[in-house]
Image (cartoon, helix red, strand yellow):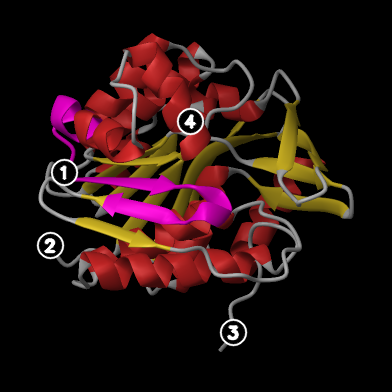
Amino acid sequence: MDKKIIVGIGEVLWDCLPGGRKLGGAPANFAYHASQCGFDGCVVSAVGEDELGAEALSIFADKGLNFEIAEVPFPTGTVLITLDETGVPNYEFATPAAWDNIPFTPAFKELAESCRAVCFGSLAQRCAVSRGSIRRFVLAVPDDSMKIFDVNLRQNFYDRELLDESMTLCNVLKINDEELETIRELFNLPEGDVKSQCRALIWSYELKMLILTCGVKGSYVFTPDEESFLPTPEVEVADTVGAGDSFTASFVASILQGKSIPESHSIATRTAAYVCTHHGAMPPYPD
């Protein structure tokens, strides 16, 4: 398959940061970073018929990012972000929002059937309309493509059923250490080291890969037969918004380019560290 389309599907929203407003949302961040890695990154979502929606589409176009974004009669999403003393964000999402109402259109179905990877999360599935559309999209993606569930837990917008269904849909799971602890409790995973818990998830959901990020403590990549660990580079952190999305996108792109697990992991680690040195989730890449 020679197609180079990588899709992020879910929320498109404005990150209202202490320093100003920036366009974000994990799927858009993921698609942007995939596009910086040589692929045709594409955002699938919905925006409102309003100024914020028009501005979002204009920015995506300016960044050269492909998108299939429906315009729906709901406000374009926003999220108020406050940062703690280490630059780690806290989120407060406005509701209702356009991204809760993503339709499943013929254009979306055609795109799904053509992509080499799709990344989806839990947040955009908080409402039934988008949850159904995301499920239909992922099911339409070819079986030999990468289907990444980036858990991305936010507030109380998830439950055991949603997580189980999403992990069943995916073949690659991206999770952080705090999310792993939540899933351990919900799914009665064995207590003890994170490696055993990750391998239990790989076995239970027949995953091809599991990515575990542990903040400053480092990150792991597991497959049924391999394990890679790398420490987190020490950098001067501006904020961590979008760092995890850049990690996932650059890792997926590297794997699709035929690179090994360790090499792909190294590229992802360096990319996420670079993003942490900038404000906002979509910094320009060096030439």
Numbered circle sitting on residue 142: 1
Q: Earlier in the sequence, mark 1 or mark 4?
A: 1
Q: Which residue is mark 3?
A: 286
Magenta stretch: give its range: 201-221
Q: Amino acid at mark 3?
A: Pro
Which circle, 3 or 4, is nearer the viewer?
A: 4
- Callout 4 crowding tier (Cα within 10 Å): few <14, some 14–19, many ≥20: some
Quarter of the rendering occupied by the C terminus: bottom right
Callout 3 touching callout 4 (CB < 8 Å): no
- Sequence-earlier tag: 4 or 2: 2
Sequence-wise first label, 3 or 4: 4
Residue at which label 2 appears: 1
Secondary element at image label 3: loop
Q: Is residue 190 above or below residue 202?
A: above
Q: Residue furthest bottom?
A: 287
Mark 2 and mark 1 residues within 8 Å of each other at the beta carbon: yes
Asked if residue 77 lies left or right of residue 65, the reply is right
Alpha carbon distance from label 4 to label 2:
34 Å
| In-front residue for pair 5/187 | 187
Asked if residue 214 lies in the magenta stretch, the reply is yes
Q: Bin the neighbour count of mark 3 within 10 Å (Cα to Cα): few under 14, some 14-19, many 20 and up.
A: few
Measured as percent of width and height from the top left, residue 160 is found at 39, 11
Residue where numbered disc 4 is placed:
179
Location of the N terminus (image quadrant): bottom left
Q: Nearer the viewer, mark 1 or mark 3?
A: 3
